[in-house]
Amino acid sequence: IHPIGRTGELTRGAITLATTMAGRGADIKLGPGVADVGGLHVLAPERHEARRIDRQLRGRCARQGDPGSSHFFIGLEDDLMRLFGSDKIVKYMEKMGLEEGQELEHPLLNRSIGQAQKRVEQHNFQQRKRTLEYDDVMNKQREVIYGFRNEIINSDDVRDRLMDIMEE
């Protein structure tokens, strides 16, 4: 395993292990002879729950006209599959006579994974939206409380205001 050097240049025969977010903001340049053997090949051990990250990883392998390729793996036990649709795929595998450990490649599988990713993204979007709605409520409450506080602080006769509050 040869890490990418400080220049960000890949050397022929190098294997680089990285996180899903590695290489953001830095170009990976192909060293001499790397393009001749196919360029950078990205092997991903799972599909991310966000399609954007999968696309970023795919985009790492063929920058600026350089050759490259990518291959993603996914298991039925992965979170994405377990939560969304692995039962359907297991039934499909049984119908087709596929055995455990055998590679699955089918447009139906890709569509199923894409739909699962879309559902996760929608769920995450709804969570962010709800958080912003709660934040708006908190801001309105804060405005009321601070407005009341400022009214008390700036009041010449606090006693009348406090009596009104006690009556309410």
Image: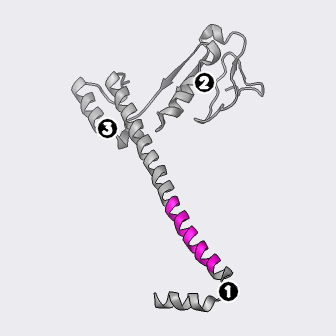
Give the image quarter of residue 95.
top left
Q: Report how far apart the C-alphas of labels 2 and 3 lie in the structure.
A: 29 Å
Instruction: Residue under label 1, please give it.
Output: 156
Which amino acid, by three-letter code, is at mark 2?
Answer: Arg
Q: Nearer the viewer, residue 162 or 118?
A: 162
Closest to the camera, between mark 1 and mark 3, is 1
**How far from the left and from the top, in percent, is residue 45?**
50, 32
Instruction: Residue under label 2, please give it.
Output: 60
In the rendered image, residue 126 lying in the magenta stretch gets the answer no
Residue at 34% over, 40% down = 84
Sequence-first disc among 1 and 3: 3
- Please determine whether, in this image, residue 78 is positioned above or below residue 147: above
Under tag 1, what secondary structure? loop
Residue 85 is labelled as 3
Q: Report how far apart the C-alphas of labels 1 and 3 lie in the structure.
A: 67 Å
Magenta segment boundaries in residue numbering: 135-151
Q: Nearer the viewer, residue 6 or 57?
A: 57
**How far from the left and from the top, in percent, is residue 97?**
24, 24
Sequence-first disc among 1 and 2: 2
Helix, strand or loop: magenta stretch: helix
Under tag 3, what secondary structure? loop
